[in-house]
């Protein structure tokens, strides 16, 4: 005989998302409107609460543990899918701010569960009106979040996405859309994580439950579904083969929200409820409304709950390590650049230069005052991309830029408006007229003030471009131009060793950081060899991008694509020493700057990201990383022979 026991937990406006934690022998669940996570320990009958800090979120929705880390949880909060650390015995002193991993455009998050491979399936729900009743709009969805945090829309035009479960053989996925009162079944491919051929498994209306709504759901070892009935004061058991209700478990709270199996032998059915939308008369009629219950004696057992298998958990561990080491990351320029690139610190003006390649813009950020200038350079016949910016020595308002296939000089006084457009003052060289879709990419100056820059073919997608169409060029102080290397795929990061004997270089689509012998007197390079192979290091599909060097002679390399990091390489040992996890994907370049060159400035881009990714992270922003314990050196400016420069400027 089933026994329903009320747990010594306060009545909640809406309890949700119960999940049994066997390693702690406790029930984890969500206190929706208080925006809190709760744990109830069955042995001690003690409770812990973690309040969540997000002023933009009206309520929490779901919580999911992460495999291999008993302190990390994925949380649905407002419009975000976020990550929070909650140590055992954590104090309830103040709300905890979460790290946002994904942001939806839907009204707000709702229920979520993981499949046997650790993918997180989660849904959203429509707005609540002023009476806290669902608006009824089909403006929500069902999503799948893979272990690398890539989110895929799976079903749209949903009103309230709710309970999820999988058959014992993993061939079917069961899914609740609450407002129409329907439980769907999908054919499920566990290896691919795909759900197909949706059809109605069970209709509440057609089975005499029209005044109730299906909510959360779980499955037992017999393959039967246990479904919470919001408005019905019960949990029902459905046989998915016969599509019939086989049992009913009444509870003294009308708005039942969800259920899960737990306890040492997984034979206890835990049930959450809420007081949401109950009148004063109904509250008096159901004094236990909003309670949490444990049901024993059912004669059935559940399965261990799946958890999220977070393959980028390393990023969180790195973040914790960085915090311990005193490393701090601050966003210093707005997000939204398509390809932010080419950071260059100008000490006498205390400003950071960088570019947005696709928009043909130079940015100048004065870090003391926060003034942020943008200059759009009008395109010429060789293209309109703007790939690098380097100051011309002894000419404070003159800059060398890569404009399409040309190297040009641009005049840009500080007295210009903060948003301005100018034409290039003079074109110094135009290259590769036989491949008009090519463009310059990264560019920097060597210790003698020569300007080095490389080219690349036209990308059809990030990292997808014709191979071996680019070159490395050296523009000498007398403005003569040499081609140093041909058959380059995607020319990128450049740096020089402090003894001026080695030139470090990145061809991104060769997936390696290379070294050349370097002759400082002549600017000649040779004897190319590989320092770090991204494929051998397991970093692919990420590609090496921009690069700089610190006073220890170590290289700092931006990783473009999904790794969200900057790596530090010891070029002597040919080993990766450190990884600095960034809050955005598509990290493009780096440079040292600040008062004593201890700040690492990092640029990023939004190119190739989905609208959801762009919304959910500071994509295309510029960051300042401090506390690294290393310094850089002043970047070289472009040195032009004064007589030659005067002649070219006319």
Image: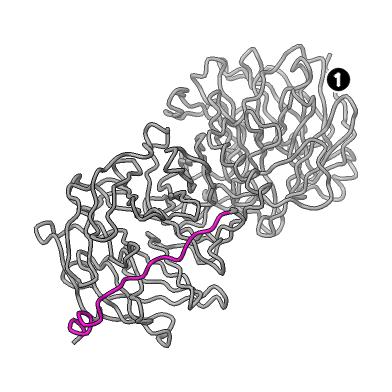
541 on left or right of 134: left
Q: In front here: 189 or 477?
A: 477
Give the percent coordinates (x, y) of residue 582: 53, 50
Residue 583 sits above or below residue 368 on the image: above
Q: In front here: 470 or 641?
A: 641
Residue stretch in magenta: 630-649
Give the percent coordinates (x, y) of residue 153: 46, 42
User: Circle 1 sits in a helix, a strand or a loop, which is it?
Assistant: strand
Residue 355 sits above or below residue 259 on the image: below
Q: In front here: 189 or 562?
A: 562
Give the percent coordinates (x, y) of residue 642: 25, 81
Image quarter in which the N terminus is found: top right
Q: Which residue is mark 1?
A: 3
Give the main secondary structure, helix, strand or loop, of the magenta stretch. Answer: loop
* Residue pictured at 54% horizontal, 58% vertical: 631
* Residue pictured at 68% horizontal, 21% vertical: 237
Residue 645 is a magenta residue = yes
């Amino acid at each position: 005989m089933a026994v329903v026991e009320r747990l010594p937990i306060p009545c909640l406006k809406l309890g949700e998302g119960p999940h049994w934690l066997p390693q702690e022998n406790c029930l984890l669940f969500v206190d929706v409107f208080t925006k809190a996570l709760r744990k109830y320990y069955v042995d001690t009958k003690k409770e812990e609460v973690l309040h969540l800090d997000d002023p933009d979120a009206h309520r929490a929705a779901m919580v999911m543990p992460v495999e291999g880390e008993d302190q990390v949880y994925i949380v649905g909060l407002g419009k975000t899918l976020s990550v929070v650390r909650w140590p055992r015995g954590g104090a309830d002193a103040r709300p905890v701010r979460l790290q946002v991993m994904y942001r939806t455009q839907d009204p707000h998050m709702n229920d979520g569960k993981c499949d046997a491979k650790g993918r997180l399936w989660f849904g959203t729900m429509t707005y609540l009106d002023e009476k806290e009743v669902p608006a009824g709009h089909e403006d929500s969805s069902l999503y799948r979040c893979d272990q690398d945090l890539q989110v895929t829309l799976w079903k749209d035009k949903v009103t309230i996405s709710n309970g999820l479960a999988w058959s014992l053989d993993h061939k079917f996925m069961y899914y609740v859309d609450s407002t129409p009162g329907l439980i769907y079944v999908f054919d499920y491919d566990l290896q691919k994580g795909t759900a197909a051929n949706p059809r109605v498994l069970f209709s509440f209306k057609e089975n005499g439950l029209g005044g109730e709504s299906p909510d959360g759901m779980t499955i037992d070892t017999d393959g039967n579904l246990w479904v919470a009935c919001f408005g019905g004061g019960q949990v029902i058991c459905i046989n998915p083969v016969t599509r019939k209700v086989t049992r009913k478990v009444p509870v003294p709270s009308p708005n039942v929200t969800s259920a899960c199996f737990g306890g040492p032998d997984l034979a206890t059915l835990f049930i959450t409820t809420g007081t949401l939308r109950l009148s004063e008369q109904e509250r008096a009629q159901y004094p236990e409304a909003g309670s949490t219950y444990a049901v024993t004696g059912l004669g059935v057992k559940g399965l261990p709950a799946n958890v999220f298998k977070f393959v980028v958990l390393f990023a969180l561990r790195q973040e914790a390590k960085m915090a311990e080491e005193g490393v701090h990351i601050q966003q210093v320029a707005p997000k939204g650049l398509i390809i932010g690139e080419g950071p260059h610190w100008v000490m006498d003006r205390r400003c950071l230069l960088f570019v947005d390649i696709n928009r043909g813009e130079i940015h100048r950020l004065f870090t003391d005052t926060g003034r942020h200038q943008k200059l759009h350079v009008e395109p010429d016949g060789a293209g309109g991309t703007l790939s690098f910016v380097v100051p011309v020595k002894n000419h404070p308002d003159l800059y060398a830029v890569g404009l399409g296939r040309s190297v040009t000089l641009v005049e840009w006084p500080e007295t210009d408006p903060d948003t301005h457009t100018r034409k290039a003052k003079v074109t110094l060289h135009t290259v590769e007229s036989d491949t008009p879709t090519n463009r310059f990419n990264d560019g920097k100056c060597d210790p003698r003030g020569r300007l080095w820059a490389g080219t690349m073919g036209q990308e059809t997608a990030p990292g997808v471009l014709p191979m071996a169409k680019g070159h490395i060029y050296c523009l000498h102080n007398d403005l003569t131009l040499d081609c140093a290397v041909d058959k380059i795929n995607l020319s990128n990061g450049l740096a020089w060793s402090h003894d001026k004997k080695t030139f470090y270089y990145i061809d991104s689509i060769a997936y390696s950081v290379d070294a050349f012998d370097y002759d400082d007197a002549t600017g000649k390079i040779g004897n190319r060899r590989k320092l770090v192979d991204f494929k051998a290091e397991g970093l692919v599909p990420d590609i090496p991008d921009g690069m700089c060097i610190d006073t220890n002679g170590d290289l700092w390399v931006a990783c473009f694509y999904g790794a969200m990091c900057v790596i530090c390489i010891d070029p002597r040992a040919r080993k990766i020493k450190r990884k600095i996890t960034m809050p955005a994907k598509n990290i493009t370049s780096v440079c040292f700057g600040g008062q004593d060159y201890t700040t690492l400035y990092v640029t990023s881009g939004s190119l190739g990201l989905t609208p959801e990714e762009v919304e959910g992270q500071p994509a295309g922003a510029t960051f300042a990383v401090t506390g690294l314990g290393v310094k850089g050196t002043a970047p070289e400016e472009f040195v032009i022979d004064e007589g030659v420069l005067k002649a070219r400027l006319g």
